[in-house]
Amino acid sequence: MDQLFDISLLNSTIRMVTPILLAALGGALCARAGLFNVGLEGMVLAGAFGAVLGNYLLNNLFLAVMFAIGCVLLLSLLYGYFTIHLKANVIVVGIAVNFLAMGLTTFLLSAVFHVKGAYYNKDMEGLPRLDIPVLSKVPVLGDVVSGYSPIVFCAFLLVIVLHLFLYRTVTGFRLSAVGQSPIVAQSAGIKVRRYQYAAVLACGMLCGLAGAQLSLGQVTMFAEGMTSGRGFIALVAMMLGQANPAGIMGSSLLFGLMDALSIRMQGLWLPTPFTMMVPYVVTIMAMFFFKDKSYLHGTTGSSR
């Protein structure tokens, strides 16, 4: 058991949880606005590719992350146009976004980098690791809370920011009102479409950060389908956390722990295919505990 549970497992958990947490927070904003965003998987994948492409073209990590966010914002605008403007079914559009991102990244991988499967460059630089002053010197605690990329710290900070936004600001209350009853919100003078577009674009920004962390923070490469279902796991984390930032962080940490544990178990006698399915088994089991769907009442079917 000592081989499984140690300080480095906590480090791996925090790194693994970051893309899931960011995408789930984005999904929560969409859910609050009445849009059940199934396209998280494709948006994170587009962000992962955008970060590598941006790094290749611009040779600057900050601009690469901004480029990734920009790529996903375009995809988010497309999602928003179909679901909000054309009132298409949000589930169908979300699935289409996932397939579009998969096809587009595969095509661009071949067209830009002239490779199939994966792109890796030994000279490609990953996101820097930051140490927290003073805390990084504390035994044990310093090893757990320090030494991550800026996006990791940003993800946990956003949990607090979004909690305050949703439960302490008028704009946050209005966003929730839009999701619960768009007609009533509109009759109260709230610009429903404006709030929904803002939520979709904010979701795109968070998914762009999630993708950048995946391709430049955890590894320095891009591989076809490298999200490996993390967008769908983020969707479950959002549902399990009831679109509440604190709840989402708790459920995301559970999935991140299972993800890190599955990698750690590959070094033991268990077969790799068995250990790799651990996070997905936990995801399915988590759905049995998902009962309260009240915040999703306005999110299924066509956008209003």
Image: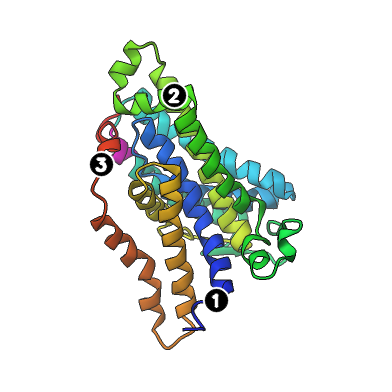
Residue 135 as seen in the image, left or right of residue 106: right
Q: Is residue 262 above or below residue 151?
A: below
Please state which amino acid type lies under the numbered disc 2.
Tyr
Residue at (63%, 42%) from the top-left corner? Answer: 67
Task: Quickly name the residue at label 2.
Answer: 195
Q: Which residues are magenta?
A: 89-93
Residue at 31%, 36% in the rendered image: 90
Q: Is residue 248 or residue 74 the one in the foreground? A: 248
Do residues under tags 1 and 2 come within 8 Å of each other at their CB atoms? no
Say which quadrant the C terminus sits in.
top left
Residue 90: within the magenta? Answer: yes
What is the C-alpha distance between the residues marked 1 and 2? 44 Å
Quadrant hosting residue 279: bottom left
Please report the residue visible at 35 percent of the width from the left and 34 percent of the height from the top.
Answer: 35
Residue type at mark 1: give it: Asp
Label 1 belongs to which residue? 6
| Picture residue at 69% right of the left edge, 52% below the top | 56
- Indicate which disc, 3 or 2, sits on the residue closer to the N terminus: 2
Where is residue 92? Give x, y as percent: 29, 40
Spatial CA span between label 3 and label 1: 36 Å
Q: Position of residue 129 (x, y in %)?
A: 70, 59
Q: Nearer the viewer, mark 3 or mark 1?
A: 1
Q: Camera-side residue: 108 or 246?
A: 246
Q: Looking at the magenta stretch, what is its main secondary structure? A: helix
Q: Which residue is mark 3?
A: 293
Horizontally, residue 48 falls left or right of residue 227, namely right
